Amino acid sequence: MSDATLQLAVIIGSVREGRFGPVVARWFAEQAEQHGAFAVDVIDLADTPLPLELPPVPPALEPHMARPDGMADLTRRLGAADAVVVVTPEYNRSFPASLKAAVDWHYTQWQAKPVGFVGYSGGSGGILAMEQLRQVFGELHAHTLRDVVSFPRYYLLFDQDGTLKEPEGPAGAAKVMLDRLLWWGSVLRDARRERPFAAEL
């Protein structure tokens, strides 16, 4: 892997039974791999215990806080990422509690990194969830991308094998977002190497 290759974490935000997230994440990971500029790491939150009970001192004040033993791999993989894509459904006009827990257990792992969104839901295609996530990641000093990939009525767009029936539009949107991730990810990675990010500035 060359130094120009970016580490891209693709996070499956839903952990509910019967979720569609892995299908969408698999499709997006294929787009990222075909793009050629990324080493793709698909992170399934269903594989990690995510307690809702946070410690008394938040990670913003104690970056190296003690976390549950089962969270160590997630923390390491988020820290290694140069860019992040969150694959999220929309639950009651917002995003899943599992995703919020994963975000809140970490802090420095998000800083000065670009974050893109792939949303899916019934009517809106996850837009409302993505807009709320912008506020959350902004508080963590991450840079959220304007360009997104959205799947409204996703159950009509994919066949039973998880293949998009009409892939051209979504593939085009994914390429735009990946191009943006490459630019921001490269610039911010170089900046973090040159000068460690200081949230208090």
Image (cartoon, helix red, strand yellow):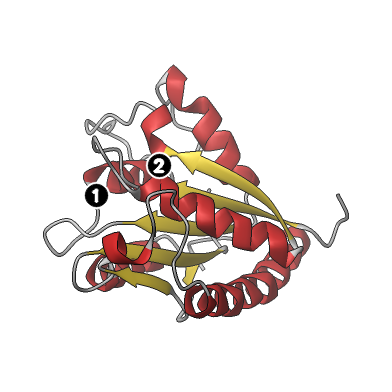
* Residue with the mark numbered 1: 96
Query: In the rendered view, would you say 130 is above or below 159?
Result: below
Residue at x-position 39% and y-position 57%: 159
- Give residue 35's position: percent from left, percent from top: 71, 66
User: In this rendering, would 15 be left or right of 74?
Assistant: left
Residue at x-position 53% and y-position 78%: 168
Query: In the rendered view, would you say 106 is above or below 150?
Result: above
As shown in the figure, which amino acid type bears the numbered disc 2?
A: Pro
Q: Earlier in the sequence, mark 1 or mark 2?
A: 2
User: In this rendering, would 32 be left or right of 20?
Assistant: right
Residue at x-position 37% and y-position 49%: 21
As shown in the figure, which amino acid type bears the numbered disc 1?
A: Pro
- Give residue 87's position: percent from left, percent from top: 41, 56
Label 2 neighbour load within 10 Å: few <14, some 14-19, many 20+? some
Q: Quadrant of residue 2?
A: bottom right
- Give residue 8's position: percent from left, percent from top: 62, 54
Nearest the viewer among 67 and 186 is: 186
User: In this rendering, would 24 be left or right of 26?
Assistant: left
User: In this rendering, would 131 be left or right of 171?
Assistant: left
* Residue with the mark numbered 2: 59
Q: CA distance from mark 1 to mark 2?
A: 21 Å
Q: Residue furthest top?
A: 69
Label 1 neighbour load within 10 Å: few <14, some 14-19, many 20+? some
Contact between labelled residues 2 and 1, with CB atoms less than 8 Å apart? no
Q: Residue furthest right?
A: 2
Q: How many numbered discs?
A: 2
Q: Residue furthest left?
A: 92
Residue at x-position 52% and y-position 68%: 201
Nearest the viewer among 36 and 104 is: 36
Circle 1 — which element? loop
Q: Nearer the viewer, mark 1 or mark 2?
A: 1
Circle 2 — which element? loop
